Image: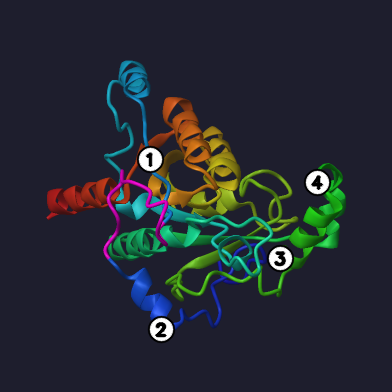
Amino acid sequence: MSGRRALRPPSGHRPHGALRARARRRPHPGIRLTHKGGADFMNQTRIPDFVRQRVLAKFGTEHRFADLDPARTALVVIDMQNGYLDPGLAHAFVPGGTDIVPNINHLAATLRAAGGAVYWVQNASDEESRIAWSVLEESVSEAQRAARVRSMTPGSPGHAFWPGLDIRAEDMVVPKFRYSAFIPGAAKGGPDFAALLRERGIETLLITGTLTNICCETSARDAMMLNFRVIMVSDGNAAVTDEEHNASLMNIYLTFGDVMSTAEIEAAIARKAEAAA
């Protein structure tokens, strides 16, 4: 895969010391309170009982993809870049975005150890993509358009991954020029992401990143309709508000895939390892 233009191994990415230490904390519980008065703004996940009951009636279980095969599972990390996480560089700042970094790093380490794969999706914007996707350019204000260009131009500080992410040499970086990582045009003529996942034998995708209700949800929906089993990681996604975060998770849970916490996914991986021992 190393020779493919749309998919490349990371080069020279090393988390800063303080951020690396913070990123390797144990993961937060899947459902927790949002501390409005402090520095921790992780979205509070709340799935109503009526939604759980509908899922149970429709699929016969609350977690239909919990029996995953780690070797056929990929962690897909979407848009964890300075352009969303650094308030000084962001065109679309997500207040709780950095608080999901420990869970993402922990899931990545767990999945690598179990034989799975990790893909870091990197959003971008250039002149070619802005012409091809002109409806977005026409829809936003001039100030927002300029901020997005400044933030998402390849090579700019905003385009870079957040330094606290534990990106390894064996992982792959996937460029994305649309909201979804899976629609035509997302990789600008490069190899199709879905096809590359299938070449690796991947069947299940763990979706994490920012924003829950935009790039993460659109990627999850498209992936499901391309016949992947999709799990949205409830405490591995971040949106601007809890309302947007939860509305998105409910959309996925009711129709397009599963919703599980970091702890639930790691427990599922551990059960599979114990069964194989």
Mark 2–mark 1 Cα distance, whole angstroms, equals: 30 Å
> Closer to the N terminus: mark 4 or mark 3?
4
Query: What segment is highlighted magenta in the picture?
Result: 26-40
Q: Position of residue 270 (x, y in %)?
A: 19, 53
> Closer to the N terminus: mark 3 or mark 2?
2
Residue type at mark 1 is Thr
Q: Secondary structure at mark 3?
A: helix
> Closer to the N terminus: mark 1 or mark 3?
1
- Examine the residues drawn in magenta and state their main secondary structure: loop
> Closer to the N terminus: mark 2 or mark 1?
2
Mark 3–mark 2 Cα distance, whole angstroms, equals: 24 Å
Question: Residue 10 in magenta?
Answer: no
Please give the label number shown on residue 189.
none
Please give the label number shown on residue 45.
1
Question: Residue 35 in magenta?
Answer: yes
Mark 4–mark 3 Cα distance, whole angstroms, equals: 15 Å
Q: Secondary structure at mark 4?
A: loop
Residue type at mark 3 is Ser
Please give the label number shown on residue 151.
3
Mark 2 = which residue?
A: 17
Q: Are marks 2 and 1 in contact (CB under 8 Å)?
A: no
> Closer to the N terminus: mark 1 or mark 4?
1
Residue type at mark 4 is Val
Using the rendered view, name the quadrant where residue 49 is placed. Answer: top left
Q: Secondary structure at mark 1?
A: loop
Mark 4–mark 2 Cα distance, whole angstroms, equals: 38 Å
Q: Are marks 4 and 3 in contact (CB under 8 Å)?
A: no
If the image is split into quadrants, where does the C terminus sit?
A: bottom left
Q: Residue at x 36, y 26 (%)?
A: 48
